[in-house]
Image (cartoon, helix red, strand yellow):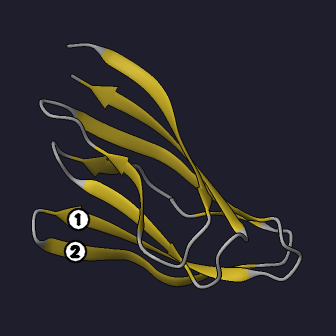
Amino acid sequence: MANNYKNALLDVTTTDATTLYTTPTATSAIFRSILVSDDSGSGDTITLTLTNGANVFSIYKTKTVGANGTEELLTQPLVLEEDQILKVTAATANRLHVVGSLLEIT
């Protein structure tokens, strides 16, 4: 088994659901942190979902991020299995940045 520490980085430039991370084949991932920061001075909201095949599970629904603020979305590790997808959706485009810190296990 190989362990690789990685960052998943996203500048949220749309209001569509946007992939932050897709777990590769034959891999598991453990997210230790998902930071969301607002750089607009206006604040915004973010939705975080986990897609498993055709099923979509809400992790955060409309989480508020204050103007020029940063929010940690995780209080416990989040485990993703092979081919699962972590997506974010912002209420307004071009306001939020997302940084996920994770460990991939292959």
Q: Is residue 28 above or below residue 61?
A: above
Measure how far apart labels 2 and 1 are at the Cα level. 4 Å
Quarter the N terminus occupies:
top left
Circle 2 Cα neighbour tier, 10 Å, few/some/many (<14 / 14–19 / ≥20): some
Helix, strand or loop under label 1: strand
Q: Who's the residue at 27% across and 13% down the image?
A: 2
Helix, strand or loop under label 2: strand
Image quarter for residue 48?
Answer: bottom left
Q: Is residue 45 above or below residue 104?
A: below
Q: Who's the residue at 26% across and 42% down the image?
A: 23
Q: Who's the residue at 14% across and 73% down the image?
A: 55
- 46 or 93, which is in the foreground? 93
Q: Is residue 39 above or below residue 82?
A: below
Quarter the C terminus occupies:
top left
Q: Which residue is mark 1?
A: 51
Left or right: where does residue 40 sit relative to residue 45?
Answer: right
Q: Which residue is mark 2?
A: 56
Label count reads 2
Q: Specify which label sits upstream in the sequence, 2 or 1.
A: 1
Left or right: where does residue 101 sit relative to residue 97?
Answer: left
* Amino acid tagged 2: Val
Q: Are marks 2 and 1 in contact (CB under 8 Å)?
A: yes
Residue 80 percent across, percent down from the top left:
26, 48
Q: Which mark is residue 103?
A: none
Image quarter for residue 85?
Answer: bottom left
Residue 95 percent across, percent down from the top left:
73, 71
* Amino acid tagged 1: Thr
Left or right: where does residue 74 sit relative to residue 50?
Answer: right
Residue 10 percent across, percent down from the top left:
57, 52
